[in-house]
């Protein structure tokens, strides 16, 4: 029988999650949202049979629900994941995993205790470029990656003012936690080593300047809270001796929006990058996937050609979740990796606050 999946939250990411689940042969049977009208509209839009005004109502009504996909503001990830696991459901949760590492640690334990799959939408791992690069890494062409540079930088990309994105209590932070994908992808390529120390600085320039608003996000909220960073720069060391530098920004004086991981290995280096000519608009993007080697005494740069994916892996990541539950694919990410990632993010914010390096326990 086909997996039965429910959507928690009527947000825009359902546009990617639902076709991803369906492409794996799963059945999306319901959408639940605190705003019942929003749930009904989303259900009609995506051809989903049932809609509910609460998660509890969905669980009570659909006894054979196998899994849920959580698409809500960040602050609700932890309680909704814990509730779903307690109800015996597998869980696919949007990023970030939660507001902090302590919450993610509790979520990982709950998944283990329940014997259920818990995955997060680190969708850039599911991009064709990332799959291709991992084949080279796993095949031994790169060797151990000594160093990497992760960047998701925007010039004009603040996702609204005063809404939940800019409210630290609801979001957990600004571009560090919102645009964590390249940090995660770099760690994925590096085989997710154990972090040791973090040093970082955040900047709040432009965070309340509406000239720097992005072309997507949520409407401005009058008298809403804006207390997150606009940009961050950091450096992470690992117990293995590897290092990672990072740049994340919603608003910073860059030439253009860039989404990239560059790395230097013992045998080869590489890059996975997307450049936007117009911030936030995928139709203007330029994708690169390259491997840098030395052959016959000469530098050789290899372009790795893959099929374009305007969804940036979002649909493929959802498909992987459904296939992983059925044992047809290995999961693209694990709760333990999510804990490490959030420990690094906690460390970045703590270092920026204290002005000192932070040791990761």
Image: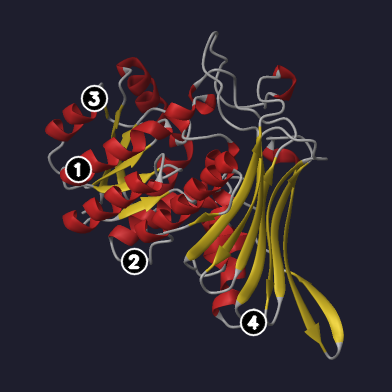
Q: Which residue is mark 3?
A: 54
Quarter holding residue 298: bottom right
Q: Tell me which numbered mark, 2 or 4, is placed earlier along the sequence.
A: 4
Q: Secondary structure at mark 2?
A: loop
Q: Secondary structure at mark 4?
A: loop
Q: How far is the residue under mark 4 from the one under mark 3?
A: 50 Å
Determine whether 150 is above or below 47 in the image: below
Colour scheme of the rendered structure: secondary structure
Determine the residue located farthest toward the bottom in the rendered image.
296
Q: How far is the residue under mark 2 from the one under mark 3?
A: 31 Å
Q: Tell me which numbered mark, 4 or 3, is placed earlier along the sequence.
A: 3
- Measuring from the top left, give residue 90's x and y in whole percent: 26, 50
Q: Is residue 158 left or right of residue 348?
A: right
Decide: few, some or many residues near mark 2? Use Cα within 10 Å; few <14, some 14-19, many ≥20: few
Depth check, front residue: 324 or 83: 83
In this view, the mark in front (2 or 3): 3
- Measuring from the top left, give residue 326's x and y in whole percent: 28, 61
Q: Tell me which numbered mark, 4 or 1, is placed earlier along the sequence.
A: 1
Q: Which residue is mark 4?
A: 141
Q: How far is the residue under mark 4 from the one under mark 1?
A: 43 Å
Confirm or deny contact between disc 2 and disc 4 (CB under 8 A): no
Confirm or deny contact between disc 3 and disc 1 (CB under 8 A): no
Q: Which residue is mark 1?
A: 65
Determine whether 21 is above or below 171 in the image: below
Q: Which residue is mark 2?
A: 328
């Amino acid at each position: 029988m086909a997996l039965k999946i429910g959507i928690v939250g009527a947000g825009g990411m359902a546009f990617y999650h639902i076709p991803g689940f369906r492409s794996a042969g799963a059945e999306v049977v319901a959408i639940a949202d605190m705003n019942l009208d929003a749930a009904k509209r989303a259900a009609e839009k995506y051809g989903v049979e049932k809609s509910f005004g609460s998660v509890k109502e969905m669980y009570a009504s659909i006894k054979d629900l196998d899994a849920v996909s959580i698409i809500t503001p960040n602050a609700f990830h932890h309680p909704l994941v814990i509730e779903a696991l307690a109800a015996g459901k597998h869980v696919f949760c949007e990023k970030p995993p939660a507001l902090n590492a302590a919450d993610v640690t509790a979520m990982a334990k709950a998944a283990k205790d329940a014997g259920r799959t818990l995955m997060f939408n680190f969708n850039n791992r599911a991009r064709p470029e990332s799959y291709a690069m991992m084949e080279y890494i796993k095949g031994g062409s790169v060797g151990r990656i000594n160093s990497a540079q992760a960047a998701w930088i925007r010039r004009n990309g603040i996702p609204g003012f005063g809404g939940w994105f800019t409210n630290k209590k609801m979001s957990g932070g600004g571009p560090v936690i919102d645009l964590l994908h390249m940090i995660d992808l770099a760690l994925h390529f590096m085989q997710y080593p154990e972090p040791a120390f973090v040093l970082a600085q955040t900047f709040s320039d432009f965070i309340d300047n509406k000239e720097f608003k992005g072309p997507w996000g949520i409407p401005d909220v009058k008298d809403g809270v804006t207390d997150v960073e606009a940009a961050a720069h950091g450096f992470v060391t690992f117990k293995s001796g590897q290092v990672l530098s990072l740049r994340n920004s919603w608003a910073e004086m860059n030439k253009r929006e860039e989404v990239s991981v560059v790395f230097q290995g013992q045998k080869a280096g590489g890059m996975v990058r997307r450049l936007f000519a117009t911030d936030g608009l995928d139709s203007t993007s330029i994708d690169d996937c390259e491997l840098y080697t030395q052959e016959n005494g000469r530098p050789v740069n290899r372009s790795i050609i893959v099929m374009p994916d305007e969804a940036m892996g979002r649909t493929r990541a959802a498909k992987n979740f459904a296939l992983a539950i059925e044992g047809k694919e290995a999961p693209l990410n694990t709760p333990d990796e999510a804990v490490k990632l959030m420990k690094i993010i906690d460390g970045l914010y703590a270092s920026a606050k204290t002005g000192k390096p932070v040791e990761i326990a």
